[in-house]
Structure formats: C-alpha cells, structure tokens
Image (cartoon, helix red, strand yellow):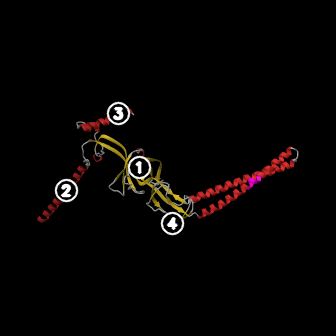
Amino acid sequence: MANGKKKSKKKLFIFGGIGLLILILLIVAFIGGNKEEIISVQVEKVVKRTITQTVAATGKINPEFKVVINPEVTGEIVELPVKEGDIVKKGQLLIRIKGDQYQAQKQRLEANLLAAQATLKMREAELTKVELDYNRVKELHSKGLASDSELEAAKSNYLTTKASLEAAEANVLQSKASLRETLEMLYKTTILSPMDGVVTKLNVEVGERVFGAGFSMGTDIMTVSDLSNIEAVVDVDENDVVLVSIGDTARIQVDAFKDQEFIGLVSEIGNSAKTSGLGTQNEVVNFEVKIKLIDPKNSLRPGMSCTADIETETIQNVLSVPIQSVTTREGTQSVDNLTEGQPEEFQQVKEIKKEKKYTRQMK
C-alpha cells in the first residue's frame, strides 16, 4: 500500500510540473506578442550631401549614322571587293551587279534613237519643200493665178507634213528618255559607298543573285556605319521619361566592358511610345531615348547590350541620411517633436519642413 501511495504522489508531481511549465510558456508568449516588433536600421549622423536622382534603362549600342545598302536593280553579284569589318571611304566601290541585260537594252535604244533622229531629218526636209510650195501657191492665188482648191490642197499638205515633223521630234525625245532611263539602271549596277565608315554587316557573296527595290524593299546587301559617332538607344519607362531632358548626363555600363564606364549626353527623346504585350497583364509602355556617347578608343561595337543611369536632377548641400535609416511606423512622433532638444542638424530638418509647408500653402 505504501508503494502505491508513493507512485501516485510521484505522478501528481510530474503532471503538475508539466502543467505549470505549459502555463509559464503561455504567459511568456502572450506578453511577448504585445511587444513592439524590433526593426533593424542603419544609424548614421545627418550630414549635408549632394544627391542625384537617376533613371535606369537598358538598350543597345548603335552607330549614330548608318546606311543600309539595298540595290535598285536585279542581277547577279560579279564583284564584291569588301568584307565585313573593312574601313571604306565615300565613293569607294562596294559591289557590282551583272548588267548584261541593261547593256543590251542600251545598245537597242541607241539604235532606236539614231533611227528616230534620221526620221526627224527627213521630216524637216519634207516640211521645207512643202512650205515653199505652199508659199508659192499663196502668192499665185493672190494674183488670181491659182484656184481656191489648189490653195487648200497646198495648205493641207503643209499642215500634215508639219504634224509629221512634230511627231518625229516627240519620237526622238521619247527615245532619249528611254535611253537615259536604261543608262541610269546600268549606272545603278555599280554601288559606291555613300560615306566614310565601316562595313558592319555583310549579307551576300559573289555569285549570289540580289533583287532590286521593285521587289518589296530589295535585298539587304550590307550596312555601312560611322563608328566614330556612337550612341546608346535605351527604353525608358513611361513613368520615368517625363523626368528626362535633352542634355542630361548619363553613365553607361556595357556588358562587354565590365570595369569601364562610358559618359554620354541625352540627344533625343522619342515622341511615340513603344508598347509590348499589348492587351495583356504584362503590357509595358516605353519611350526610346538616344544618348550620344564619348568613346575616345572607338572600342564600342553596334549591337552591344548596355545599361544606362540617366542623371535627371542633382541637389547640392542638402541634409540627408541613408535610405537604410528610414522606416515607416504607425503612431510615431512628428518631426517637430523629434527635433526638440536635438542637435543643430535636426533643428535644420524642422526648419526645412516648415518652409516646404509654407510653400505649399502659397501655391
């Protein structure tokens, strides 16, 4: 019996201790839940700094001036003296297209022109003779030596011959125009460089057949770019583009040059939006902004990816703290209360706040 009582007391102590421990844990959890959440912040003294507002954007490196070469005639490439990456001068031969058909057409039209000119000379001689006959009949008619019918026949012959001469003259002009058109097409079989630059893109080879501008836009033969004038073309979000102005400084990071920063100036801001994902939840509206870059080494190449930080506004000598020191809490004291009894820097914060409030009231 004594052993049974001891076991019962032992169980009572064990269960009692467990219950007391659970009660203590519940009390601690309840008290701890009412405590304010501790937020870690970076603490730093308020100092005067120069703060710059920036707009970030991504895009590509492109030459400021480039020309896409498209042929105006159709034919086979018989000469291609340049390759991609070559430096070319204005007027230098870029490509020659086989022009046999235009050469044959030129010879045929030259023969037609000679025939038309010969016909014109014959009509001129006929008109001279007919005009003399007509004048002679008019003189005889005035003296009563020629009848009215003879006068009318001479006049009709004169007018007919004159019309034939005018037709011959028009035929000569038409032959000249056709020959000039063919010569122009024959001239276009030779394509010269429109400017000094570099062949940054070459899409054809010797022996390949290209199509002229009459076939849609024609074959894209090559691109000549002026690499001495480079720009970054970036897409800026519609909410940020209103902050960007012509002449703003931009700092460009190019993926191919990790440790190098390029400086540029905003030269152009697009007026029309570029929309992607239209009608979907991922719809994005951007505006194209061009930034003229300073690249003394001419190391940048078209198509390189880049990131731009456009400096839209700079404020100098302003009181500031790191963004990591700023938090938002409910029921916090106002700036007026926080600055009471604080150092001079905090008093300046209070004055700035009052000044801004007064400015808003004036507006």
User: In whole angstroms, how far apart are the C-alphas of marks 3 and 4?
Assistant: 76 Å
| 2 vs 4, front mark | 4
Between 180 and 70, the residue placed more toward the observer is: 180
Mark sitting earlier along the chain (3/2): 2
**Rendering coords of residue 348 (x, y %):** 27, 36
Locate the N terminus and report the quarter of the image it occupies. Answer: bottom left
Distance from Cα at disc 2 to Cα at disc 4: 92 Å
Q: Position of residue 335 (x, y in %)?
A: 28, 38
Residue 154 appears in the picture as rendered: yes
**Residue 327 part of the magenta segment:** no
Q: Which residue is mark 2?
A: 21
Q: Furthest residue to the bottom?
A: 207
Q: Amino acid at mark 2?
A: Leu
Disc sitting over residue 358 in the figure: 3
Q: Secondary structure at mark 1?
A: strand
The quarter of the rendered structure image containing the C terminus is top left
Main secondary structure along the magenta-highlighted residues: helix
Q: Which residue is mark 1?
A: 292
Q: Separation of disc 2 and disc 1 at Cα?
A: 73 Å
Q: Secondary structure at mark 4?
A: loop
Residue 208 in the image: state x and y as whole percent.
Answer: 52, 66
Spatial CA span between label 3 and label 2: 60 Å
Instruction: Describe residue 159's horizontal placement relative to residue 4 as left or right.
Output: right
Q: Identify the amino acid type marked 3.
A: Tyr
Image depth: mark 2 or mark 1 in front: 1
State which region is magenta. Answer: 122-127
Looking at this view, is 94 or 306 the one in front?
Answer: 94
302 sits to left or right of 134: left
The answer to whether residue 336 is seen in the rendering is no
